[in-house]
Image (cartoon, rainbow, N blue to C red):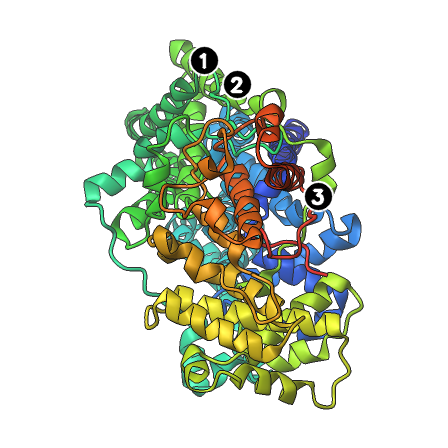
Amino acid sequence: MSLRLEGRARLYLPLACVAVLAALARGLAHPTYFVDGEALIGPTVGRELFHGHLLDLFHYQIIVYQGSLLVDALLAVVGFAVFGDHLLAWQSVSLVYIAVLAVSGSYLLDSVCGRVGAIAFPLLLATAPFLVKDGLLAGIGGHGSGVFYAVLSTALAVSAGKNPDQRGRALLAGAALAFGCWYIRTVILALPACLLAVSRGGPRTLVRFGLGLLVLPTLLLGNIIALWWVESPYAADGILALCRTVVWEVRELGSADQDLWAKAAESVGAPYRSLLFAQPQSAVSPVVPVRPLGQAAATIWVFGWLAALPVAVAFLGASWRRPSTAPGQPVMARLDELTLKAVVPMLVMAYVGAYIFSPLRAEAILGEWAEIFPPTAPGVNAPRYLVPIYLAWTLLLSFALGCLSQAGGWRRWTGWLALVLVAGSGGLQAQGDWFDDRDPWATVGNVEPYYYFKMFGPGRGPPREVHEKCATDNPVSRSNHLFTLGWFIGQTPEQLLSAPRADREALDSFLKGRSLSEEDIRVVVHGMGRALGDQMFSSFQLESDEVLGVARKSAEALGKGRGGPYLYGVGESMDHGRLSSKPSQLVSLLCFEMRWGTRPLCSLAGQLLADTGLTEVPQDPQGLFVADVPALADLPPSVRLELVRGASIGLVNSSAITDLDDARVASWPDELGVFFAESWQAWKTGENWHDPGAAGFVPGPFR
């Protein structure tokens, strides 16, 4: 880094801190929103490593064809060591990436387009819309984080091309790109830009860059050896199959539904303008406030991204046409300047083009969210393939602003005014997190660790032996491992159809020679039920009533005390969409009575049958439900209570009724009115008075 840049770094580093603080403020405003299953795989594994499983590191290499899980998990270990089990630990890796991305981007832009571009990038990161900022926070380990390695390696390549006498820079640029490609393979898109940058340093610089790229095959070979050594399930088909998987595994992505023109519009955010500055629902008020000038701000950003490309092309052309002051070789001097300025557009267009022409696309549900008004933030995973594209456009926009400032005259002032307009419109929306719709401070330190093992069973995580060791005293970690053991023990629906006691016999066999408390056993059977319900979710071989019949017989074979947690697991993971399509049958399907008198799944029926179109508490309890629910007066008292409890949770979760009318509820029959009010308040304030899984069928604290 030159002395000139080191002096400017005094400005860029504080700006990078602004980007980090803006992202942190977003996370603190809505902490539970960012606790997402797939997005937090890395930090969850980091938490496990922190609690005593470091020697089992490669058993946690769940995505074997990318190294991001290992890298981010090891980084997260530091976060848990510093912050404990706190939101800051879960978000620490994301914040580190944002900080270094801001610094790397500033350095790159300073080198190719000057100070304004270098200032603009961290400012635009700080004021970036939902689909960028939330994606950076929640999408670690994926393509969004990969942009960091792409920008870093390109910045180092530019430095190597400008300073060929500094031999280590080209080697470092190649090594950074190689490490990024091992982290996640899409970083290979930065290769053309890196080659263009280092080519300015001559053949020797290119050779050193190529030597740095040898880090990639070295890391891949290390991965293969380690996974073979620990007898990973991916090694079961032989060394050649393992090599093929580790080097590059192409998952079935399907073909994009849109044509190329539609995907081009999607890549710049045109169909998702209503979502660009959407906000997640607050725990304080379930109504998402409409931010002032939200649509205008979204339009400004989309137009800014679109305008950045022609501005960049115009200035590349100007660089070629501009007379050179270098004596003797004007053409070479202009070509050198053109090469330098073309690096950033080439990097950005590689990402945009790859998205448009590849099968990758935004999740289909994103289009449905875009139709909602007022706009509400979708799940943090839905836009994961768009985050790197929008980051790339933001980098190009900063480049265009920097080029305008270098032109002088009215164009310079145009660049500054455009920066103020784009960053200001984003900042106006971001401040709403704090002043319009912020969760209480009490929720920040109590973000519950996500039970990652509820998503990943046999073949998609550590082998059974790792869970059986369970060498930790941490209660959450221990529950995670015991729960996952249930996945290994649980029998298939087909086995249970022919032998209803198969789960009971598998559990008895597992418990032989083991000393587990009854509480631990309930966690294991909860996992067994979850595995059965998940097979219904992922397979259409059995109808819902068939799976529920199998589950009921299996639960009764397990006996009182174990059958309930088993059915809670079934209820958590079974396909609620398929159940909701049969509203008239839900009470009979889910409110069956066990032989010991309980109805474990009945509150799920109430949750699925709640009338989410309600805007106020109805005059009587029957009004809580859709029309197909039988008259409450004709149902047994225990069924009525469970349906009312489930309805209260369904209404709170759906934000249908925003305020509990105590006077109206008081006019209901005493038992139902009191029960509804207690259920409503307990679920809304997060006091978790209900048994795990019994009421909400969402991940809850399992002790």
Q: Which residue in the protein does label 2 denote?
A: 428
Looking at the image, which is closer to me, 407 or 463?
463
- Write the residue at 59% across / 37% down: 669
- The relative height of residue 496 versus residue 662 in the rendered view (above or below) is below
Q: Are marks 3 and 1 in contact (CB under 8 Å)?
A: no
Quadrant showing the N terminus: top right
- SS for dot 1: helix
- Left or right relative to 111: residue 295: left
* Relative image position of residue 275 (x, y in whole percent): 41, 32
Q: Which residue in the protein does label 1 denote?
A: 417
Marks 3, 1: nearer the viewer: 3
For label 1, the crowd category at 10 Å Cα-Cα, with few meaning under 14, some 14 to 19 and many 20 or more, is: few
Q: Marks 1/2: CA distance? A: 16 Å
Q: Amino acid at mark 1?
A: Leu
Q: Which residue in the protein does label 3 denote?
A: 687
Marks 3, 2: nearer the viewer: 3
- Write the residue at 66% across / 39% down: 678
- The relative height of residue 674 versus residue 638 in the rendered view (above or below) is above
- Write the residue at 43% across / 23% down: 401
Looking at the image, which is closer to me, 354 or 178?
354
* Relative image position of residue 564 (x, y in whole percent): 61, 66
Q: Marks 3/2: CA distance? A: 34 Å
